[in-house]
Image (cartoon, grey):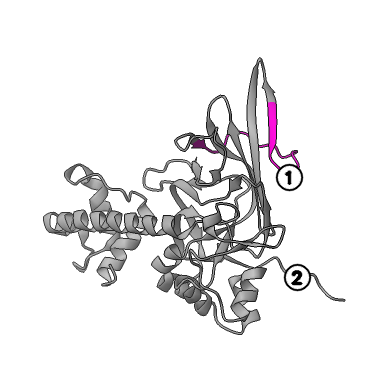
Amino acid sequence: MPLPEHKYYTLEQAAKRAGCGVADLVHFAAIGVLELCIKIPSVGFFSTTAKSEESSSPIGIESLSIINDPNVRPEDKSSYPDVVYDYEKFSDTYQEIVLQDGAQKIHRNRYTYRSEYLSVTEYYDVERRIKGIEKWHGLLAVPSIWINEDESMLIDDLVHAFNVDVLVPPRVPSFVACDDYTIGEFYLDDWYELYGYDLLITNYEMTLLLNGGKPVNDGRLAIDTSGSQKSDASGVGAIPEVQAINKKSERFAIYREGLLKSAIYLLSKYPNECRGERKEISPEKWRDCIFNHLEEIPALSITNEDVMLKHLRNAVNGKG
């Protein structure tokens, strides 16, 4: 009896199907010819600060989608989450709704996007002039910059944890969406920790891989419901990804440089605090030294312990 097709594959399943190793898949993703995804957590994105033993806290998310409506101003605030209406059915047409919240009426415009892998409903609150995510479901893609940063460690062990703070819609051959709505990237207010075994490959991406792969770049095209191709210049149906990711990459490099400058300063000032029993530089003790002397250095943009430790380990191993 024939089985239905997979919607997505784990890296191990994809490697077996492609006749290659998991290390090859990680490398293809790191160089930007294969897109890897994760499932949207059903309980939301959460961060934990292990050093201070704080409980997990929800991560705010900003959608960079575009609503082509003259009544929606570019400076309007975005927020997530606000409300979730699980009982609402998906519609690919614009909807205007009025909700009753006690004595207060909430006037919202609703905009939707749907592909085989992702369904998103965003709203615009007319009175408060706030745009936010009302509900979403499916997969989000991990930009190759984050895979590239941790390529060697992911190749060694899929239990390796790495952090992201921007996710994008998966590339697809077709989707449906409101004519006045263009889906964009999703920026996280804090670092979100992933593991190699969280990564998935969509069936569409698997097909591309088996035919030689396809670069993930700003020339991406999407096909609307009429079958006509639209580039990102059209403003509708496009996924304007790479420019934002490049800016993110530049900003991340600046953050890393600031961390390493401060780390080297503290290493020269407190060498014994940064060394292990054999007087070798210990990335863990070096990290602890930084946290113990935060008042002596400029404010750091990288404050997540795991991210900081990763960069210090790279510096010690000559990869920084």
Q: Distance between the residues labelled 1 and 2?
A: 24 Å
Residue located 71% across and 43% down the image: 93
Quarter of image, res 269: bottom left
Mark 2, residue position: 5
In-image side of 143 versus 114 (left or right): left
Predominant SS of the magenta segment: loop
Q: Which amino acid does label 1 sit on?
A: Phe
Please give the label number shown on residue 143.
none
On whether residue 222 falls in the magenta region, the answer is no
Residue 4 found in image quarter:
bottom right
User: Which of these two is toward me, 227 or 209?
Assistant: 227
Can you give x and y, in whole percent of width and height, for residue 79 in the image?
Answer: 52, 36
Amino acid type of the residue tagged 2 in the rendering: Glu
Residue drawn at x 46%, y 61% as measured from the top left: 161
**Res. 15 in view:** no
Local SS, label 1: loop
* Residue farthest along the top direction in this orientation: 103
* Quadrant that contains the N terminus: bottom right
* Region rendered in magenta: 78-98
Residue 224 position, x and y percent, is 67, 58
Which residue is denoted by mark 1 in the rendering?
90
125, 22: nearer the viewer: 125
- Among numbered discs 1 and 2, the one appearing first in the sequence: 2
Residue 206's x, y, as percent? 63, 73
Crowding at mark 2 (Cα within 10 Å: few <14, some 14-19, many 20+): few
Q: How crowded is mark 1: few (under 14 residues within 10 Å), some or many (20 or more)?
A: some
In the displayed image of the protein, which residue is found farthest to the right?
A: 1
Q: Which residue is drawn at 24% across and 51% down?
A: 290
* Above or below: residue 45 compared with residue 115: above
Mark 2: which secondary structure? loop
Position of residue 223 in the picture relative to residue 284 (left or right): right
